[in-house]
Image (tube, helix red, strand yellow):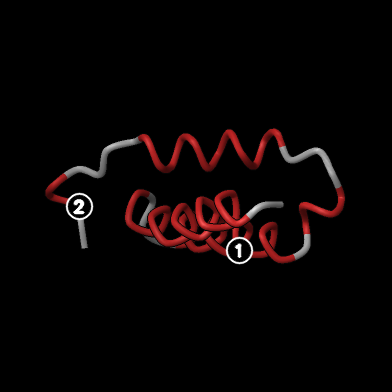
Amino acid sequence: MDHHEKMRLRAAAFRVTRLYPGPVGEVLSRELLTWEEFGYRLGGGALVMRLVDHVLKTPIAQGEAA
């Protein structure tokens, strides 16, 4: 996994807690950070990278931003 992909995963992990506040965002954030550290070695990262794309492209509602 190259540096750019790792940075996208970390950015998505931070942003997902603002996009989905509460336990859902926390679980997704931990999953993304764990994937960046270990999971990519298992292969099959298409779903994770689609999640990263979704999180980075979805606007955060102004009233919900922390």
- Which residue in the rendered view is the most extreme toward the left? 63
Q: Residue at x 61, y 39 (%)?
A: 49
**Which amino acid type corresponds to the residue marked 2 in the rendered image?**
Glu
Point out the frontmost of discs 2 and 1. Answer: 1
Residue 12: % across, % down: 46, 52
Q: Residue at x 50, y 51 (%)?
A: 8
Closer to us: 47 or 4: 4
**Relative to 37, 29 lies left or right:** left
What's the mark number on residue 64? 2
SS of the residue under disc 1: helix
- Which residue in the rendered view is the most extreme toward the right? 42
Closer to us: 1 or 12: 1
**Callout 2 environment at 10 Å: few (<14), some (14 to 19), or many (20+)?**
few
Residue 25: % across, % down: 46, 56
Return the residue at label 1.
33
Sequence order check, earlier mark of 2 and 1: 1
Closer to us: 16 or 42: 42
In this view, 58 is above or below 15: above
Q: How many marks?
A: 2
Q: Residue at x 73, y 40 (%)?
A: 45
Quadrant position of residue 50: top right
**Which amino acid type corresponds to the residue marked 1 in the rendered image?**
Leu
Quadrant, the C terminus: bottom left
**Relative to 56, 45 lies left or right:** right
SS of the residue under disc 2: helix
Residue 38: % across, % down: 77, 63
Quadrant position of residue 30: bottom right
Residue 47: % across, % down: 67, 35
* Distance between the alpha carbons at the discs numbered 2 and 1: 23 Å
